[in-house]
Image (tube, grey):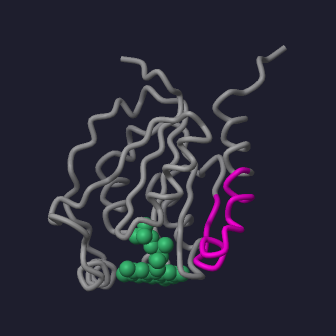
Amino acid sequence: MTPANRTLIVYYSRSGTTARIGHALAQRLGADEVTIQDQRAQGRVSVWRAALDRLLNTSPPIAPITAPLENYDLIVLGTPVWGGRAAAPMRRFLKDYGARLPAVAFFCTMGGSGAASTFEDMQARLGKPPRASCSFDARALGTGSYLDALDRFAMQLNGDAHPPPSR
Ligand SMILES: Cc1cc2nc3c(=O)[nH]c(=O)nc-3n(C[C@H](O)[C@H](O)[C@H](O)COP(=O)(O)O)c2cc1C
C-alpha cells in the first residue's frame, strides 16, 4: 500500500513538547504522523522511570507501529533529549524498525544541550546520516522564537520530499 502523503513524522514525547513540534511539522508538510508509545505506561511515563532508562541504557517495549514505513520517501524522527541521547522509546524504535526506514531526518527538543550527541547516536544506530536535522531548546520553545527554525526545517524537508524534476 502506498501512503497518500510521502513524508511520515514519527516521534516520542513523554511530556508533550516533542509532540507539539511533531504535530506542527506534520501540518506544515501535510505529512502523516505516528507517535511511539511506551507499552509499560498507562499515561505519562514518570520522570524517574525515564531517568532510570537513561541511566541503565534500557529501552522499553513499544506499541507496534503499523504504518507502512518502507513506502514513504522520508521519515522524520523526533525525540526529547535524555542525558545527551535519544529517549529510550525512540532508541527502541530504531532497534526494532531501523532497518525498514527509507531516508530520514531528525529533530529533538531539550532543556538546553545534547542535540549533537543525540543526533550522532541516532545516526550510529541507523547506520546512515539524516538528510536534515533541527533542535529546539526550552528557551526558544518558551518564547515562540522556535517558529522560524520550524518553518526553515519544514522548507528544507519539503524540498527533500518533493525534489525538482531532473532535467
Ligand atoms: C530523563 C530525562 C533526561 C533529560 N536529559 C536532558 C539533557 O541531557 N539535556 C537537555 O537539554 N534536556 C534534557 N531533558 C529535558 C527534555 O529533553 C526536554 O524537557 C524535552 O523537551 C521534553 O520533551 P517531551 O515533552 O516531548 O517529553 C531531560 C528530560 C528527562 C525526563
Relative to 36, is 142 above or below? below
Image location (x, y in percent) of residue 102: 49, 36
Q: Residue at x 38, y 59 (%)?
A: 12
Q: Position of residue 121 (x, y in %)?
A: 49, 66
Judge whether residue 86 can be spotted in this image.
Answer: no
Q: Quadrant of ligand 1?
A: bottom left
Please give the name of the residue rendered at 38% of the width and 42% of the height, measured from the top-left corner. 99
Quick one: quadrant of the C terminus?
top right
Give the answer, above or below, for where 31 lies relative to 110.
above
Residue 118 visible in rendering: yes
In the image, residue 129 above or below residue 99? below
Q: Is residue 141 left or right of residue 84?
A: right
Position of residue 147 measured from the top left corner of the image (x, y, whole percent)? 69, 59
Position of residue 9 relative to residue 164, above or below, is below
Tell me which residue sits at (67%, 55%) in the image.
Answer: 150
Q: Quadrant of residue 149?
A: bottom right
Q: Is residue 146 magenta?
A: yes
Question: What's drawn in magenta, residue-wise?
Answer: 134-151
Q: Residue furthest top?
A: 167
Residue 5 image point, x, y percent: 50, 26
Horizontally, residue 16 falls left or right of residue 145, namely left
30 within the magenta span: no
Q: Residue at x 25, y 79 (%)?
A: 46
Q: Quadrant of the N terminus?
A: top left
Q: Quadrant of residue 44?
A: bottom left
**In terms of depth relative to the viewer, which is nearer, 155 or 145?**
145
In the image, is 107 to the left or to the right of 162?
left
Q: Main secondary structure of the magenta part?
A: helix
